[in-house]
Image (cartoon, grey):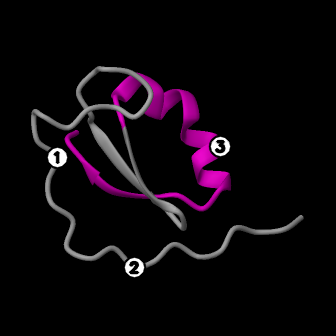
Amino acid sequence: MPTAPPCPAPATTAPLTASDRCDRCPAAAWVRVRLAAGDLLFCGHHHRAHRDGLARAGAVVTASVR
């Protein structure tokens, strides 16, 4: 099974703000994940829904409100 390339080390990651929105819906972002292709923001619901797939893809949580 091929593995995803390693994620780049996070540079200083700014904290999430009230204006950050989920990349899947208009809800407030609670989690930022880093993939080799870039960062994604997720609300709590979408992070829970995609957490296993993100982990298999090598995603790393770089910011979380909770």
Depicted 8 relative to depicted 30: above or below: below
Depicted 50 relative to depicted 57: above or below: above
> Which image quadrant is residue 51 in?
top right
Q: Which mark is residue 51?
A: none
Query: Do labels 2 and 1 touch, CB within 8 Å?
Result: no
Query: Most extreme residue toward the right, as rendered?
Result: 1
Q: Amino acid at mark 2?
A: Ala
Residue at 65% over, 74% down: 5
Residue at 31% over, 20% down: 26
Circle 3 SS class: helix
Q: Is residue 4 left or right of residue 54?
A: right
Give whichever of 41, 60 is nearer the camera.
41
Sequence order check, earlier mark of 2 and 1 = 2
Circle 1 SS class: loop
Circle 2 SS class: loop
> Which image quadrant is residue 42 in?
top left
Q: CA distance from mark 2 to mark 3?
A: 20 Å
Q: Which mark is residue 16?
A: 1
Q: Is residue 57 left or right of residue 9?
A: right
Q: Which residue is mark 2?
A: 9
Q: Amino acid at mark 1?
A: Leu
Where does the image place residue 21, in percent across and percent down from the top left?
Answer: 26, 32
Work out which quarter of the rendered image holds the N terminus and state it: bottom right
Query: Do labels 1 and 3 touch, CB within 8 Å?
Result: no
Magenta region: 42-66
Residue at 56% over, 35% down: 50
Q: Which residue is mark 3?
A: 53
